[in-house]
Amino acid sequence: MFSLFYGLWKYLFSKTEFHVLILGIDKAGKTTLLEKLKSVYSNLEGLPPDRIVPTVGLNIGRLEVSNAKLVFWDLGGQPGLRSIWEKYYEEAHAVVYVIDAACPSRFEDSKSALEKVLRHEDLRGAPLLILANKQDLSEAVSAEELARYLDLKKLDERVYMFEAVSAHDGMGIKESVEWLVSEMERSKRTEVLRVRAGVAAPGA
């Protein structure tokens, strides 16, 4: 009986909370992604696409996935707002970087913004999930083509995943988030943030 109650207690109270940044230049589909996550992982219905407006500042979404609590910070991607991104880096366990795969004319801007994010010391060791979004559109380039353009071979030393997704219809979303949770749970970055916060690892 004790083990039953202990197991229930552990399940209810030992969930790790992870802070995840959703970054990308404006109109990449970051807020649409957050709304889709809400509808996939909670009983809350996300906003329909025609009611989603560009993020000015910050949107926050809280979800539970497997045995983890995720707090998503969706930051505005307009050029004038990107300077605030780094204010959130220090507390982030991971980064989700969203790219509009249907707009090749903006790939260079998106690549440049991503490279600046990855150079920042405060994100050292943070797992990176890059999403080639808008795969529901016929003009979207393939994940392979976009990966070549971004020259992801330079990321060999960083834990990352590149995935083709559609925040509109949900394609690839669950697989991507499940990978992210798995990587955060065993990430050295998570260990560093736990030590900094004075929190013991689950099961310790």
Image: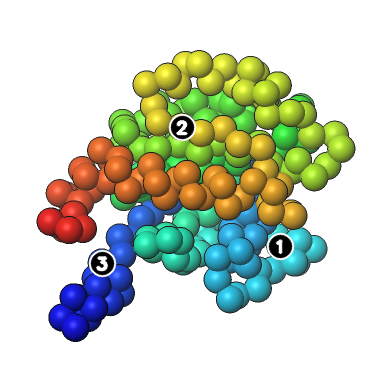
Q: Amino acid at mark 3?
A: Ser
How dense is the environment of label 1, judged by Cα within 10 Å: few (below 14), some, or many (20 and up)? few
Q: Is residue 184 left or right of residue 110?
A: left
Q: Amino acid at mark 1?
A: Ile
- Comparing 69 with 74, the one in front is 69
Residue position for label 3: 14
Regarding residue 80, the answer to whether it shows in the image is: no
Foreground mark, 3 or 2, reads 3
In the rendering, which numbered label is found on residue 80?
none
Q: Is residue 91 left or right of residue 102?
A: left
How dense is the environment of label 3, judged by Cα within 10 Å: few (below 14), some, or many (20 and up)? some
The answer to whether the residues at label 1 and label 3 have Cβ atoms under 8 Å apart is: no
Regarding residue 201, the answer to whether it shows in the image is: yes
Q: Earlier in the sequence, mark 1 or mark 2?
A: 1
In the displayed orientation, state which residue is furthest to the right.
138
Q: Is residue 129 left or right of residue 193?
A: right
Q: Earlier in the sequence, mark 3 or mark 2?
A: 3
In the rendering, which numbered label is found on residue 160?
2
> Marks 1 and 3, Cα distance to the nearest angstrom?
34 Å
Residue in the image at 16% along x and 49% along y: 196
